[in-house]
Image (cartoon, rainbow, N blue to C red):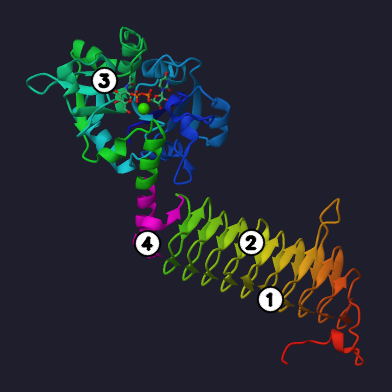
Amino acid sequence: MEELVTIILAAGKGTRMKSDLVKVLHPVAGIPMLAYPIRVAQETGSSRIIVVVGHQRGRVEAAFHDDSIVYAHQEEQLGTGHAIAVTEDLLKGYAGDVLILCGDVPLIRAETIDAFMKAHRGAGAAVSVLSVVLDDPFGYGRIIRNKNGDFLKIVEERDAGERQRKVREINSGIYCCDASFLFGALKQIKTDNDQGEYYLPDIIGIAVDEGKHVQAVETADFQEVQGINDRVGLAEAEKVMRRRVLLHHMTEGVTILDPEATYIDGDVVIGRDTVVYPGTHIKGGTKIGTGCIIEAGCAITDAVIGNNVHIKTACVIDECCINDSVRIGPFAHLRPRTVLEKDVSVGNFVEITRSKIGKGTGVNHLTYLGDADVGKKVNIGAGTITCNFDGNRKQQTVIEDNTFIGSNAALVAPVRISRDAVVGAGSTITKDVPEKSLGVARSRQRVYTDVPERHRSKSGK
Ligand code: UD1
Ligand code: CA
């Protein structure tokens, strides 16, 4: 295979985003948009990927580290031509093909780039540009051809004359060039345009003047080459990308009841025969097994979920590990570092954080477990609370196998309930309860029989 280097332009601020965050780090389907062209570059077999960074370069560089990625620094954004020129030192002695992608064009697909590269190599062109015909070409650089259809140059919207503006074939901002031609041509481009910038597209006119072969390779899908310039474009790209993600899961055997109302991030993995109800957000690096049911309105982030898990309506699950055949919800809140072993059942209005719950245990109603290590086959009664915060730090509660915690118990940590023990309902437990014993900590009920008439219930009369 011929060698390929990809350069991705990502130095601009993205002024029209009106954001404190540099444009290329804005997420599309939960992943910073720059990740998409980087993936395309990897999939098309680039031996090196050079990302040109400028604005918030530290943040951009921190977001992507991979041995195949090198960063080039463009201190001042003097134009797309200048941005490519700053990579010259990194490419000294390289004479192969250079693919140029944009950090703000995330919808481009590897298959489209493969076809484009094939056309470039097949034609032996010095430069190829990926073009597309738009109904509304406003804002894009136009592909200018002569009467015979020969590609002559690219003219930006703001530099275009009236006739040129009518041209509907536009420059996608994606190019493939011969490296030795590219850096020679960049030295010749000028800033005699409306923005006073070094325009990369000017290399086309230079190649034509030098008698080199250039071509615009048209692609059919205009969505793929849409550049994101503002929040409206961001929302449009979001919609397209989310649809692609859902199509992928549906193709792989996941039932999505309403694709219009389901939000799944690009890196999420879901097993076959899992059913996802509407209004659900599945985010980050979440992995879900096979045969699960995720009911309406759940928000699941960075969780690992086994097979045959049933998550009922309106649960929030963050950074948890949930094993096979667990039942959760409705209305449960599982916070980071929670591990639910097999066959656990967590019911409504239960909050669990930094806790491990053993196999077959039930935590079914109105409970808070924090910093708890709960064994197997435990029954946690309704309203049980681990009092895990002593005012200074978090303390551990250990609840061993086969214990029974009566309703409305307050377990004041640090405390241990040993195996087969029982805690009486309504107890405030401050001391350990040993194996097979009963811990009760509440005032005794007293019954008075000689109650004066005025204190007795008037109801039922
Ligand atoms: C550019 C093209 C236009 C094309 C359009 C496609 C130029 C002059 N025009 O216009 O023909 O139709 O893309 O989307 O190239 N960048 C840098 N350093 C700079 C300037 C830009 O890294 O000095 C980066 C930006 O961060 C961005 C990309 O290059 O990722 C494109 O720049 P942008 O200003 O968005 O160009 P457009 O006006 O969209
Ligand atoms: Ca752009």
Q: Mark 1 highlights which residue?
A: 361
Q: Mark 2 highlights which residue?
A: 334
- Give the residue drawn at x 7%, y 20%: 147
Question: Callout 2, which amino acid?
Answer: Leu
- Give the residue drawn at x 38%, y 37%: 232
Gap in Å between the C-alphas at discs 1 and 2? 15 Å
For the residues bearing labels 4 and 2, Cβ distance under 8 angstroms: no
> Residue 185 location in percent, x, y?
31, 12
What label sits on residue 420 in the rendered view? none
Between 50 and 9, the one nearer to me in the picture:
9
What label sits on residue 157 in the rendered view? 3
Q: Mark 4 highlights which residue?
A: 258
Residue 262, magenta (yes or no):
yes
Q: Report the mark closest to the observer, 3 or 1.
A: 3
For the residues bearing labels 1 and 4, Cβ distance under 8 angstroms: no
Gap in Å between the C-alphas at discs 3 and 1? 66 Å
